[in-house]
Image: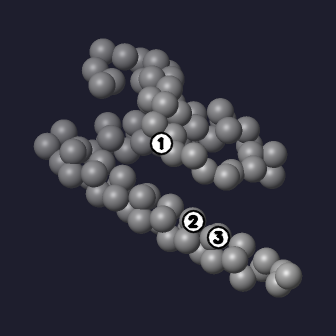
Amino acid sequence: MTEGLSKTEAVGKLVSLAKEVEIKENIDWADMTMSEDSLYELMASNAIEQMYTCPEDHREGVMLATLTKLLVENFALSYKLDQSRINNVPSE
C-alpha cells in the first residue's frame, strides 16, 4: 500500500482510506484540543512509523495485533460511554 511513496504521501493515503471506512461514531470533535484532520495525520504517521520499524517478516502480525487491540479498546470505551449515557438519563 505504501511501497514507493514518501512518508507524507503514505500518511495522506492512509488518512484518506481510514476516513472512507469510518464507522459512524458520535464524536464531538469540538471538544478535542486537536482537529480531526490533525489527529488522523498523527495516528497515520504513528502507524506507518511502527510498520517500518518492525522487521518485514513480522509486519503483518504486528499490524493485525495492533488493529485487534485498538478495536477491542474502542469497543470497550464505546460500551462504557453507552452505559454512562444510559445511567445518566433522568427518569420520566
Residue pictured at 79% horizontal, 77% vertical: 89
Q: Say if 70 sits above or below 41 in the image.
A: below
Which quadrant is the C terminus positioned in?
A: bottom right
Instruction: Say which quarter of the image contains residue 53.
Output: top left
Mark 1: amino acid: Asn
Q: CA distance from mark 1 to mark 3?
A: 26 Å
Label 2 sits on residue: 78
Label 1 sits on residue: 46
Mark 2: amino acid: Ser
Mark 3: amino acid: Leu
Asked if marks 1 and 3 touch (Cβ < 8 Å), the reply is no
Residue 26 relative to residue 66: left or right: right
Residue 68 pos. (x, y %) = 34, 58
Question: For the residue carrying disc 2, how many other residues have a C-alpha within 10 Å: few (<14), some (14-19), or many (20+)?
Answer: some
Residue 63 pos. (x, y %) = 30, 48
Outermost front residue: 92
Q: Secondary structure at mark 3?
A: helix
The answer to whether residue 45 shows anywhere in this view is no
Asked if marks 2 and 3 touch (Cβ < 8 Å), the reply is yes
Label 3 sits on residue: 81
Residue 58 relative to residue 20: left or right: left
31 or 34, which lies in front?
Answer: 31
13 or 91, which lies in front?
Answer: 91
Q: Earlier in the sequence, mark 1 or mark 2?
A: 1
Residue 29 pos. (x, y %) = 74, 45
Asked if marks 1 and 2 touch (Cβ < 8 Å), the reply is no
Outermost left residue: 57
Q: Say if 91 sits above or below 77 in the image.
A: below
Residue pictured at 30% horizontal, 25% vertical: 1
